[in-house]
Every structure is written in structure tokens, then in C-alpha cells.
Amino acid sequence: MIKDKIEEKIRNRLAYLVRRVPQGNISKFIYVYVYIMTSPLMPFLKENKQLNYGLDLNDEHLRSSIEKNEVDLEKRAWSEEFNHGESWSETWGSSQAQWQGSILPRISKWLPSSNILEIAPGHGRWSTFLIDNATFYIGVDFSQECIEFCQERFSEAKHARFYANDGQTLSMVKDNSCDFVFSFDSLTHLEIDVMESYIKEIIRVLSDNGVAFIHHSNAGEFLDIYPDLIPGWRARSVTAEKIKNCIESNGGVPLLQECINWKTKECIDCLTLFAKDTGSKKAFTSIQNDLFMVEAMLIKTRINPYMTETS
């Protein structure tokens, strides 16, 4: 049943992607394959070598082209074209302005912290701030390339460790060991089955007084508006309510959810704060913030200039 749903998901996305790229071009298959291979559907794709739309992974020419381009595209996405992830903060002016003006005010209560875990740090856009606020820091990412980059970038931070994982578990992190778990602008692409796996793991590693702050999709609430592709490749099966239920059913307590618009009018994303259920009653707050992009504009025009050196 689960595999049938995953296969249907792959076929639907392939169908949409293939319609968007030129016909009769090998780049079509590379584009589609790289998209799937960088998604949580990769394990299923490896088991099923043959899919519709001409994507035959047994074709040696196709495989060699894919393998070369997959590496090249990943490095390109993280390096020159997107400036190691910095370009994704341009709406706020810079990553420093986004951190100081948007992210830090939401999590300052829990920083600095003794033991911080960051999920999907990429090239360390937020790691640079978290490491400075931690006695001990762990960064976990599915991409080996990202891990190697961060290991080199933060080599002088002796209290920081980076590990590659399987994209859904945190086996290298001990039970009850983390005081603050953080992930921002990464988990928005993960579907609900992978999110549930991560939430189980986060609750496992949280200390009794620990808190997790994660940024995820809420796009499942707007499938009528976005029937094909949701802006920013947001996960279609995830909603704030599903994440809340998932936390509660896995021994956690949701503390706050802020649904935000992300370069859209609709609140297709959500920021969720939660903790381990230790038996004490904790209030839950729900916020609908469709002015998140207005906040970003104000940060870019009012705060970012202070972050930029002027002559």
C-alpha cells in the first residue's frame, strides 16, 4: 500500500516535470532523475529501476550522463549559482539580516544552548550562528557533499561535528541529548512519511527541557489552488495540522505553530515549536501570519543596511 502511494507520487511528479522540459533531450531525463534522487523517494526509485516516461536506469548512456550531471548539479547549486545558499536569503537582504531580524527573535529564548542539533545545514548558512550559540553542536545532512563542505568551513570550531545520514533518521545522536533542535528552509520539501520519521527521532533525542524549532510545508492546505506544482517545491502531503498530530502521537507536545506565506499570498509554510511530553501541561498557540513576506521586505530595507559595511 505504501509503495503504491509512493509510486503514484513519483509518476505524478514525473508527468508534470516531463511536460515542462523540452522533448527529445537527454537533459529531460537528467532533470527528472536528479529531482527524484534528491527527494525522500530515492530508496523506492532504487528498487524500481524502470518507470514510465522513458526513464530507464539500465541504459548505460543515460546512467553515465546522470551520474556526472547529478554531481555537477549538486555542486553548482551549492556553490557559484546560489553562493553556498546565501542567495536564498536575498529576499531579506542577507542571511545575517534574516537571522537577526526574522529567525533569532523567534528562538532567542533558547539560545545560547548547551547541545544544539541542526538538521539539513546545507553549506552552513545557519550553522555559523548556531555554532556560536552552542557548547556542543551537531549538524546532520543527507548530502555527503554538504557535510564535507561544513567540516572544512567550520574546521576551527572544535565543539562542532557534522554527520551524513539516510535522510530520515538521527542514529548518530544519543537519546535525550539535545537541548535545542533546529531546521530552517530545508524540511519544507519532505513529505509526511519522512517528516514523521524525523519527528520521532527529534523527540527521542530531545532532553526533558529541550525544544525543537522546525520549518516545514503547509502546502497540503492549498492543493485546490496549486493542483500541479506548489511554489518552492513544497511537500504536498504536509500540513500544520498533520505535523501537530504527528508530534502528539509520538510522545511530543506542540507548543506553537506559525503558518507563514513564503513568496506567496497563501501560508504554504509553517514554523513549529515542540517539546518532549514530560507530563506537565503546556499551552498551545496557533498563529496565521500572512505578512511574513512584508516582514522580509522590512528587514531587507530597514535592518540589512546595518549588516552591510559602508565606506
Image (spheres, rainbow, N blue to C red):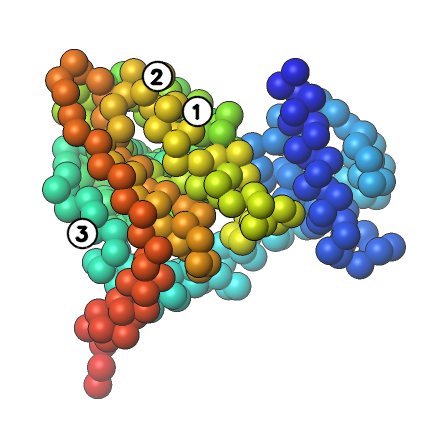
Mark positioned earlier in the residue sequence (1 or 3): 3
Mark positioned earlier in the residue sequence (1 or 2): 1
The image shows residue 5 at horizontal and vertical percentages of 65, 25
At a point 77% along the width and 40% down the height, the residue shown is 63
- Compared with 75, 117 (above or below) is above
At a point 39% along the width and 66% down the height, the residue shown is 90
The residue identified by callout 1 is 196
Q: Which mark is residue 250?
A: 2
The image shows residue 180 at horizontal and vertical percentages of 22, 33
The residue identified by callout 3 is 105
Left or right relative to 224: residue 94: left
The image shows residue 78 at horizontal and vertical percentages of 49, 54
Q: Distance between the residues labelled 2 and 3?
A: 28 Å
Q: Which amino acid does label 1 sit on?
A: Glu
- Compared with 296, 45 (above or below) is above
Q: What residue type is labelled 2?
A: Asn
Residue 174 shows up from this direction: no
Q: What residue type is labelled 3?
A: Pro
